[in-house]
Image (spheres, rainbow, N blue to C red):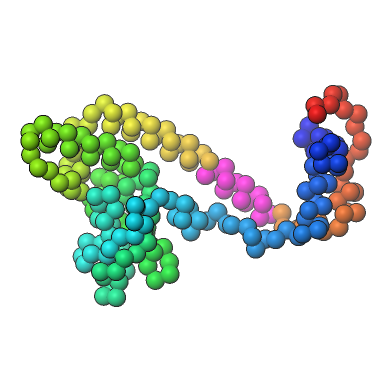
Amino acid sequence: MYEFYDHQEHPALGQSPFDAYHQGIVQTGSRPSRLIPYDENFRILTLPTTSKGTAKVISNQGVKINHLYYWHNSFRNGSIEKTRVNVRYDPSDAGFAYAYVRGQWVRCISQYYSIFHGRSEREIQLATQELRQQYKQHSQKFIITAKALADFLEGTQATESILMQRLKDGEAKDILSTISSHEEIKSESSQKTTSVVSETESLQSQKPAEIKPYEEFW
């Protein structure tokens, strides 16, 4: 069905969508240099960052993002310490963050990784709100720390809102996993097709035989 209508003349184009697409390829080329590969670098660049976009490298601690310190061994370099680096964090997994060091993105590990790994940004936010509310009721001054968050998440204090968020995060991860698997299959398939048709005549020869349409939809 798709191939049939793809080769029928469209009133807005004055030709079929198939011809319009390949005419553009013939006239301007495929321009592969303008394609942006969906790779790890692209994925990191599309992750959110902090309000400043950078974080200071603290000696023996790393970079601080959303109350948590993240570490990578490249921070041991004296020329890196006390400098500000671009950072990104994964909203679906607080166990990891990324820092741009010496021209490349490096993956950093969080404090209390075993606890924060797999926790979403939203769950951390809810836990932070709950902690603040608890200490507010006791009229105590409280500063959010990674240890306080880790103890809260590891304990049995999780409220209904946090438990509900965990269920939502689990469902979202299942969907993303399905999408990623589908994209991998498409990528493998596209790699097998490397030839590009460059002449209009050869494109025209690929048209299917004329078929009488059952009904026009435009």
Q: Residue at x 43, y 66 (%)?
A: 104
Q: Position of residue 24 (x, y in %)?
A: 78, 53
Q: Residue at x 71, y 54 (%)?
A: 193
Instruction: Reply above or below: 178 against 193.
Output: above
Which secondary structure is most common in the magenta stretch? helix
Q: Residue at x 60, y 46 (%)?
A: 185
Depth check: give the residue in front, 208 or 67.
Answer: 67
Q: Is residue 121 visible?
A: yes
Q: Position of residue 11 (x, y in %)?
A: 84, 36
Report which quarter residue 191 is drawn in. bottom right
Q: Position of residue 186 (x, y in %)?
A: 62, 47
Q: How many marks?
A: 0
What's the magenta region? 180-192
Q: Residue furthest left?
A: 139
Q: Residue furthest bottom?
A: 79
Q: Is residue 40 visible?
A: no
Horizontal arrangement in the rendering, residue 54 relative to residue 172 (left or right): left
Q: Residue at x 78, y 32 (%)?
A: 1
Report which quarter residue 152 is drawn in. top left
Q: Position of residue 137 (x, y in %)?
A: 11, 31
Quarter of the picture containing the C terminus is: top right
Taking the magenta stretch, the answer to whether it contains residue 187 is: yes
Instruction: Reply above or below: 149 against 32.
Output: above
Horizontal arrangement in the rendering, residue 215 relative to residue 106 (left or right): right
Depth check: give the residue in front, 181 or 157.
Answer: 157
